[in-house]
Each structure stands twice: as C-alpha cells, then as structure tokens.
Amino acid sequence: MIPSAIALRALRQTLRQLNVTPIPNPSLTTRTAAFILPIQQARHASLLGNLRDIPTQHTNKRRVGRGASGRGKTSGRGHKGQGQRGGHRPKKGFEGGQTPQWITNPARGKNTKNPLMKHYTELNLCTVQSWIDQGRLDPTKPIGLKELYDSRAVHGIKDGVKLLARDADSLKVPIDIVVNKASQAAIKKIEELGGKIETRFYTREGIRFITRPHLFPDGHRLARPTSREDIEYYRDVAHRGYLASTVLPGESASLYWYKKHVKIVDPKEKERLLEERKKRTPEEIEAARRKREIRKAQTHNRIF
C-alpha cells in the first residue's frame, strides 16, 4: 500500500525533528522506500506517537450563537419569522401564503409555451414574386421546400411553410409550388393565374432531409400524418391536400362523420342482375336469405 501525500509530508516533518536523514539505496527506486529504510534500521520508539496532521489541513466548524455580534445571538438568521425557524424552507414560488402571481396573472397570448403547438414559417405571394423578379426562383420549374430554403425565401423551417396572400395582386406569373399549408386566398390567386399548388405533410426530420439531403447519406423514408387533424387536413380538396385522391366518391375528408358510399351501377348492368335474380332456384334464394341474416347479426354484434 502506497502512503498518501499527507502521510509522507507528516513523516518527513517528523524525521526532520528527529534529525534523521534518509539513506539513499540504489536498489530501491521509489520515494517511499527511501524514507522507510532508516526507520527499519534505527527503530525510534517515539516515532508513531509524534505523527501529527498538518495544522492547515482541517478547518473547524464555525460555532454560532456564542457572543453578541456576527454569528452570535441570532446566529446570523435575523430576528423572528420563517427564516429563523429550523428544518423548513418555503418551496420555490411561495409568496407568503397569498395567491401566487402565476395563478392570478397567468401568461397569455401566442408566446405562451405549448408543447403541441406547431410553428410554420410564413411565406407571402409578394415575396415569391419578388424572388422571381430577382432571378432567385424559376417559375418554369416546380418550387418546393428545398428551392425556398436554398434561395433564402424562408429561414429556419421548423414544422413547415404556410403560404399566405399578402399583396396577392403582385403575383403575375403562374407557379407550381408545394408547401405544407396555404390560405384560401393564396390558393385562389395561384389557380386564377393557371398555376398549381399542393399541400404536403412533412415531419421535422423529413424537412431536414428535403432541405439538406447531404446529411442523410443512406436516404430517409418520409412519414405520413398520424394525427386526426393532419389526416383530415390533407384529405380535404379545399386545402389541395396530397391525400385528396384517397377519398372515395360520396365521402368527406373527415374520418368519422362521412356520407355513406353510394355505389353507382350502370342501367344495363342493373337489368342483367335482375334477370339473373329471376332465374334463381328456391335453394339459391334460401341460401341468399340466410347469408343476409348472418351479415345483419354480425353488424349488430360488431364493436366500434
């Protein structure tokens, strides 16, 4: 076991008091062996009894309540009150028992933190036309998030880009643009000029993959919307969502409150089915009736 630095220092001080000089030994290379060697030869009986710590190594605990000033009398806690009682301190935000300010005057407004809030970067049609005039955007090619990011039309895309219609009359050329959300006025103006707009869902990771593909050498699979609000938004034709093609005829964009699907049958096909029904045998009619009853029972017992 190697002695600590404090023990070696105390041993050196004791040897200095006893006027003992360590004898160097070429065979021992460690510093500890050089100090131990003379002790083995001389064997001073009072050596262990004189070992002391360094005086400045330890600091005594301050004794409060002794005297009339400084840490005496009230021990530095002041006179009376909650601060002088021992064993308890009020929690953070405690205001002496009155209703706290964070309850009486809570934070309100759009700057209040909401973990579910999505932050869309706003893009106006006047900015798009200005970038086209400067040659920073090409209206003859599709405009996506990467083109908007590379041309610096938008900065710091978090949850997507929303197209707005500020100074919509300044847009003069038709464009083909893909954004995350768009206002009705912006959609109307673009389609009046003969352009095309599509709203598409991207996660934050998907936006990073589109705007900076060099960060994904192995590629990245774009996710589809999972929340009901996002799915219904991109299924809606009014929003020009990219999932509008998945809506069947007679249905609405909502996932729960939709119109019943109406099957459209050709009149000639309907006459052919009626003729085949008339030619059925009694056994086939009875089998069809039983099949209808089974389906009806399954519908009543189904759990939604």
Image (spheres, grey):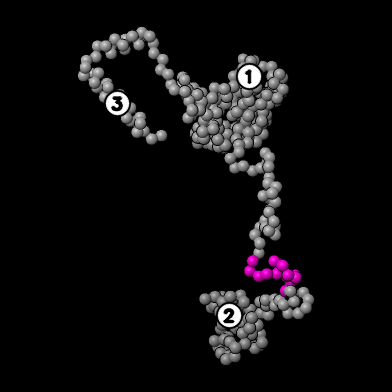
The answer to the question of whether label 3 and label 2 lie on touching residues, with beta carbons closer than 8 A, is no
- CA–CA distance in space, label 2 to label 1: 94 Å
Please give left or right for residue 189 compared with residue 67 in the image: left
Residue flagged by tag 3: what amino acid is it?
Glu
Q: Residue at x 55, y 28 (%)?
A: 233
Q: Residue at x 41, y 17 (%)?
A: 263
Report the residue marked by disc 1.
188
* Mark 2, secondary structure of its residue: helix
* Mark 3, secondary structure of its residue: helix
- Report the magenta stretch's main SS: loop
The spot of residue 191 in percent (x, y) is 62, 17
Please give left or right for residue 27 compared with residue 287 in the image: right
The circle drawn on residue 210 is none
Within 10 angstroms of label 2, few (less than 14), some, or many (20 or more) residues?
Answer: some
- CA–CA distance in space, label 3 to label 2: 104 Å
Within 10 angstroms of label 3, few (less than 14), some, or many (20 or more) residues?
Answer: few
Q: Which of 11 and 72 is in front in this view?
A: 72
Residue flagged by tag 2: what amino acid is it?
Ala
Within 10 angstroms of label 1, few (less than 14), some, or many (20 or more) residues?
Answer: some
Residue 79 in sight from this viewpoint: yes
Q: Nearer the viewer, residue 181 or 29?
A: 181
State which mark lies toward you, 2 or 1.
Answer: 1
The spot of residue 104 in percent (x, y) is 69, 49
Q: Which of 80 and 63 is in front in this view?
A: 80
Residue flagged by tag 1: what amino acid is it?
Lys
How many badges with numbers are in the image? 3
Quadrant of the snapshot with the C terminus: top left
Magenta segment: 75-88
Report the residue marked by disc 2.
34
